[in-house]
Image (cartoon, rainbow, N blue to C red):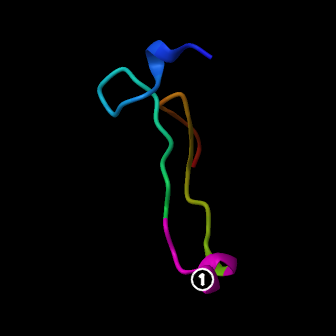
Amino acid sequence: MNLDYIGSIVVGKRADLVLTIPPEEMRETKVVWTMVAGKTVWK
């Protein structure tokens, strides 16, 4: 793992995106897009 690209939220670094919802709503959640390394790979 290259630590030059993770660790803080700034331009040029990678980050996870987290959606927080109540557990009872998880079954109804729909995926609307997927990103990998800052690029949309599915929409």
Query: Residue most toward the left?
Result: 10
- Main SS type for the magenta part? helix
List x then y, in percent, for residue 42: 61, 44
Does 12 sit left or right of 38 as displayed? left
Query: Does the segment drawn in magenta span residue 25?
Result: yes
List x then y, in percent, for residue 32: 56, 59
Q: Is residue 24 above or below residue 5?
A: below
Does 9 sit left or right of 28 as displayed? left
Query: Residue most toward the right?
Result: 27
Q: Is residue 28 above or below residue 30?
A: below
Query: Does the segment drawn in magenta span residue 26?
Result: yes
How many numbered discs, if any?
1
> At x 46% / y 25%, what residue is drawn?
6
Q: Which residues are magenta?
A: 20-27
- Mark 1 residue type: Glu
> At x 61% / y 73%, what residue is drawn?
29
> At x 33% / y 34%, what residue is drawn?
9
List x then y, in percent, for residue 10: 30, 28
Secondary element type, mark 1: helix
Q: Is residue 30 above or below residue 10?
A: below
Does 35 sit left or right of 12 as displayed? right
Residue pointed to by mark 1? 25
In the rendered image, the quadrant that contains the N terminus is: top right
* Towards the viewer: 23 or 30: 23
